[in-house]
Image (spheres, rainbow, N blue to C red):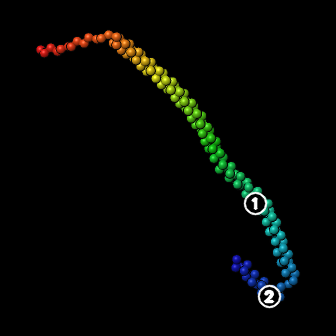
Amino acid sequence: MEEVLARAHERLKQASNNLLDPSQTKAAFERARAQMEALAQMGAELETLLPEEIGLAVREGLRAEALPVARQLAELRGLANQLIRRLMALEQELEAERFARVEDLGLLVDLIAGSWRTVDKRLARMEDGLNGHEATVYRIERDSA
């Protein structure tokens, strides 16, 4: 590094003293121009290759990261659909059970109402039997022994 700096300082001294040959200056400019053109060409190549390389890297990264996530989402979707089907079946079973209980309750109400009608009829017959006749009441005494 020190050598390069020393050479640069020497050339600057020569240029300031006009000791530099015009042919050397022209050759230096030609080399600089060639190096600038090479640098511009390399920049253009990088400009065309870099987006492709970055695109490939991004696609590869997404593929590597998104594929497991996509599988997990598909599995979750399947589980959610299965859960929905099971809940619908459970809802149908509960509704059928509820209707069965309502029918049982209706039958029980009919049985109780029929029993009370029968009791009411029997009581009415007993009252009719008592209304037409006077009943004799006997006193039952206890023995004091």
One can see residue 78 in this view: yes
What is the CA distance from the residue labelled 2 to the residue labelled 1? 43 Å
Residue of label 2 = 16
Number of the label disc, if any, that sits on residue 112? none
The one of 137 and 89 positioned closer to us in this rendering: 137
Is the residue marked by circle 1 packed among few (<14), some (14-19), or many (20+) residues within 10 Å?
Answer: few
Q: Which of the two marks, 2 or 1, is nearer to us in this view?
A: 1
The residue at the point 64 percent across, 42 percent down is 74
Give coordinates of residue 29: x percent, y percent: 84, 77
The one of 101 and 118 positioned closer to us in this rendering: 118
Give coordinates of residue 11: x percent, y percent: 78, 83
**Looking at the image, is mark 2 or mark 1 earlier in the sequence?**
2
Residue of label 1 = 50
The amino acid on which the numbered mark 1 sits, given as a three-letter code, is Leu
Position of 73 relative to 10 (above/below): above
Secondary element at image label 1: helix
